[in-house]
Image (cartoon, rainbow, N blue to C red):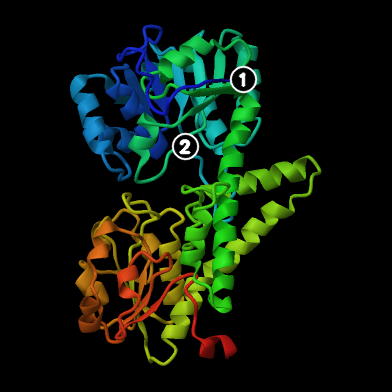
Amino acid sequence: MSDVGAGGRDPSRPYGPPRVIDRVCVYGLWHLGCVTAACLAAEGMPVMGLDLDRERIAALRDGRPPIAEPGLAELIQAGLAARTLQFTDDPSEALSRANVLWIAFDTPVDDDDRADPAWVRGRLEAIRPAVQAGTLVIVSSQVPVGFTAALERAWQRGDPSLRFACAPENLRLGRAIEAFRQPERVVLGLGEGTDREVLADLFQPFCGRIEWMTLHSAEMTKHALNGFLALSVAYTNELARICERAGADASEVERGLRSEPRVGPRAYVSPGSPIAGGTLARDVAFLAQLAAEHGQPSPIMDAIRASNRLHQAWARERVLELAGDVREPRVALLGLTYKPGTDTLRRSSALELGRWLAVQGFVVRAYDPAIQPVSAYRDALLLANVELAASLDEALRDADVAVLATAWPEFRALQPDDLVRRMRHPRLVDEAGFLPHLADDPRLTYVRVGRPISREEVER
């Protein structure tokens, strides 16, 4: 059942904090939690951000979020100035006047895309004694189906007045503020006895369309959405690799697909990078695990992961081919972060490629506008064997192959002459076709996913 309106805020409802909300405590302050707290406070709601990391709290009190996200620092600073936003590492202080507890941890994901909901559960138990009677607990962390209902059962045994809801996050790194403040719809799962009106009032500044469902269905919707997107990415990349050999251009096939109403202009049908970052893949892993727990085969989930592993090798193979005639080859890695608009390296396919090439004996020099020199960068250990350049020019100098790894807008200014003058061999791997204006210059060797390779290469 849904309350249906246009995407974005319901114009018939007034701005300002909901009258039934005394204070919202947002618990877990990395990307999801900081965005949630800042956006709620911007609407005039009294918000207390809670995290047990004292250094993080000190930085946030100074207006410095732990991760780069366009507009986030400014929004936090505005909330601090308006006194609608505060931060603490003390659960008693955070929860003493809060009647909404919003769980917003970014659930850790390992190298096999498996999330750790027990990590979230442990942090919830750490604050349980401070939660006040009658509190509405909203779970937005990335957790498997059944997590919120299990939390509801456990906590209501000690206090039946607690109420529970699930609001699956749907943010995107680099566009998170817009995604939170102007969603096309909000999915909300209701626990036993949870007041729909309180939740509607809480979300009314942001969206006039709410899809109401059970806790289990809301959590499954998150898995289903990301699983479907992962399937689309894997299918499109697999199709593009076939296009390369069959003489078709995947970018033209993409145009044909988007023009079909049953596919549509917003479908995930652009060939390019593999699934990375641990977001989409996490939910594929959740679904595969759920299927196994319930004795259901999941060949599609298995195939998504297998296809993505194959595609992870595409850029590696292209670099090896392009540098095959060079002794002591040098690679310029253009971009390192998981996505443009952020500074996170967590599960970045660009960084994984750079480290792999370094192990193969390449000299890897990377430039990313969001990453500072190693001596000052907090994740320096992640960059082992990958040298950081201070500028794009420095990264390209005397390189044998350049790899466009993160689609930062400033890279669009690259012209053929830039590569010809600076590189020892002007060869570019542009996985997602971000720089199509470089494709046809005869002085460059340019490869992208889905671009037809020559007949000679096909017949080799």
Please tell me which residue lies in front, 238 or 298.
238
Residue of label 2: 170
Disc 1 and disc 2: Cα gap in Å?
22 Å
Question: Is 58 drawn above or below residue 253 in the view shown?
Answer: above
Look at label 1 and name its amino acid: Glu
- In the rendered image, residue 437, in percent from the top left (x then y), is placed at 30, 70
Residue 141 in the figure: left or right of residue 7? right
Look at label 2 and name its amino acid: Asn
Report the disc number at residue 26.
none
Number of numbered discs overlaid on the protein picture:
2
- In the rendered image, residue 387, in percent from the top left (x then y), is placed at 31, 71
Q: Is residue 390 visible?
A: yes
Residue 86 in the figure: left or right of residue 260? left
Residue 33 in the figure: left or right of residue 1? left
Query: Which quadrant is home to the N terminus?
Result: top right
Please tell me which residue lies in front, 1 or 181.
1
Question: Is 210 drawn above or below residue 364 in the view shown?
Answer: above
The residue lying at 38 percent from left, 67 percent from top is 384
Query: Which quadrant is home to the C terminus?
Result: bottom right
Q: Which of the 4 quarters of the picture holds residue 429?
A: bottom left
Q: Which of the 4 quarters of the picture holds residue 145?
A: top right
Q: Is residue 61 visible?
A: no
The residue lying at 37 percent from left, 51 percent from top is 344
> How packed is label 2: few (under 14 Cα within 10 Å), some, or many (20 or more)?
some
Label 1 or label 2, whichever lies nearer to me, is 2
Residue 454 in the figure: left or right of residue 437? right
Please tell me which residue lies in front, 158 or 331.
331
Mark before the other along the chain sequence, 1 or 2: 1
Residue of label 1: 152
The residue lying at 48 percent from left, 34 percent from top is 169
